Amino acid sequence: HERSVLSDFLLTLLSLALLTPDPRPPDGAAHTCGQPAHPLPKLVAMSATLDADLFAAFLADGQGRAPVVAVPGRCYAVTKLHLEDLLPLTGCHAKKLSGPVGPGRVDAELLIPTIEHVALHGEPGAILVFVSGAAEISRCCDALERSRRLRDLR
């Protein structure tokens, strides 16, 4: 969900490994000193939002684009609700918030009662929460794990 220097570095190393000609002997040939004894890595990137053409061009070998496989999925009915739409239903008030909420930041203390309300009073189904990155995901997961009401629903 989030790019980082490390993920970009790993992608660069993988692309170099994938684009370097395979120094291994053909099947059945004797292995010679100085050649790698392990197979070269294969890269599979899966994402609903990945720019497949961009990555295929980046990872292209000298003979064309890297292969792209598209797997269509089923569409499900989705109801979009924004945090501010549900706030009055949760009993939360602005004075209870743990800090300022702005673009790219989710207040976990506001998120919990909102998810509890939807889980307890909404229709059966999944709750999908969009947050900006790995740190935000961890913070929200930690807060959700502390919820007794959600734990009782399991």
Image (tube, rainbow, N blue to C red):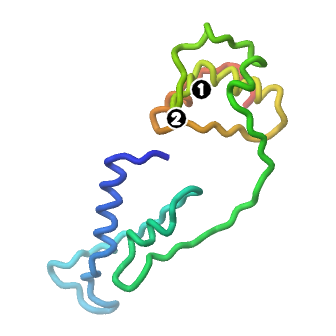
The location of residue 39, given as percent across then percent down, is: 33, 74
Number of other residues with Cα within 10 Å of mark 1, as a class: few under 14, some 14 to 19, many 20 or more: few
To which quarter of the image does residue 12 belong?
A: bottom left
Relative vertical location of residue 65 with respect to residue 14 in this rendering, above or below: below
- Left or right? Give the position of 67 relative to 89: left
The location of residue 145, given as percent across then percent down, is: 59, 26
Q: Identify the residue position indicated by label 2 in the image.
A: 137
**Quick one: 120 or 38, which is closer to the camera?**
120
**Quick one: 123 or 152, which is closer to the camera?**
123
Amino acid at circle 2 = Ile
The location of residue 128, given as percent across then percent down, is: 67, 40
**Quick one: 88 or 129, which is closer to the camera?**
88
Q: How many marks?
A: 2
Number of other residues with Cα within 10 Å of mark 2, as a class: few under 14, some 14 to 19, many 20 or more: some
To which quarter of the image does residue 149 belong?
A: top right
Residue 50 disc label: none
Q: Identify the residue position indicated by label 1 in the image.
A: 145
Amino acid at circle 1 = Glu
Please state which of the two labelled residues, at mark 2 or mark 1, is closer to the viewer: 2
Task: Name the residue: 44% across, 66% down.
Answer: 55
Q: CA distance from mark 2 to mark 1?
A: 12 Å
Task: Name the residue: 84% across, 35% down.
Answer: 123
- Left or right? Give the position of 74 relative to 55: right
Q: Secondary structure at mark 2?
A: helix
Q: Earlier in the sequence, mark 2 or mark 1?
A: 2
